[in-house]
Amino acid sequence: MRRIGVFVGLTVLALALGPIDSAGAANSPTFRDCSLFVSGFDPDFVQISGVTVTPEGTLTVPLSQKQVPIEASESSDPGDNLAHVTLTVSVTAPHVPAQSLSGEATGRVELSAPLRKRKRGRSYTISWAATFDNGNHLCPSESTPENTTPKPFVVSID
């Protein structure tokens, strides 16, 4: 019960403070900001790596690359990185069977999203969902202003 009271109190405080200017917390081609309630407050995130970002903002990988890492991580706030994190990923592409994978850990989870049946020009949609703070903080959700709806990563074979 005390935990709920603390959570409600922090929520009211965050709403009363209004938007907080954060250092780099916003969506980008490789980053999804899962800050709770306002940008920069409990700045958990999901990030894809191992890709090249083109000048147009699209994500590419070479034909030889078989997978891309995707990570869900608690913020670096003191004590926050001790909470349970889950990450579920689904990879879809035309004429390729869908692949789903999930993982869970303390502080951060990293999965390798498979890129099956690779050929030049093929695009893979990597959908994701994460929970932070021992399941109390979902992303995407109405509580994560940068990601109220799903915003998958789209990776193309170069």
Image: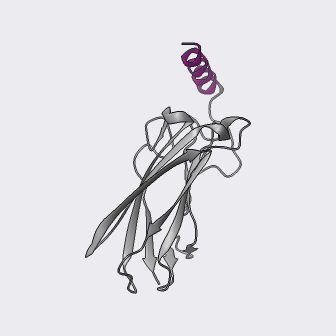
Q: Residue at x 60, y 41 (%)?
A: 39
- Quadrant of the image for the N terminus? top right
Q: Where residue 101 sits: x, y (%)?
A: 40, 58
Q: Where residue 109 sits: x, y (%)?
A: 56, 52
Total labels: the figure holds 0
Q: Is residue 158 above or below residue 145?
A: below
Q: Where residue 131 sits: x, y (%)?
A: 49, 41
Which image quadrant is residue 154 in?
A: bottom left
Q: Where residue 152 sits: x, y (%)?
A: 42, 58
Q: Name the main secondary structure of what is drawn in magenta.
A: helix
Outermost right residue = 78
Considering depth in this image, is 115 or 29 the residue closer to the camera?
115
Residue 8 within the segment the image draws in magenta: yes
- Left of 65 or right of it: where is 101? left
Q: Residue at x 53, y 70 (%)?
A: 57
Considering depth in this image, is 138 or 20 the residue closer to the camera?
138
- Left of 72 or right of it: where is 20? right
Q: Residue at x 56, y 59 (%)?
A: 28
- Left of 43 or right of it: where is 63? left
Q: Would residue 27 be seen by someone viewing this image from the given angle?
A: no
* Range of magenta residues: 1-16
Q: Is residue 154 above or below residue 20?
A: below
Residue 2 within the segment the image draws in magenta: yes
Considering depth in this image, is 24 or 128 the residue closer to the camera?
128
Considering depth in this image, is 144 or 72 the residue closer to the camera?
72
Which image quadrant is residue 52 in?
A: bottom right
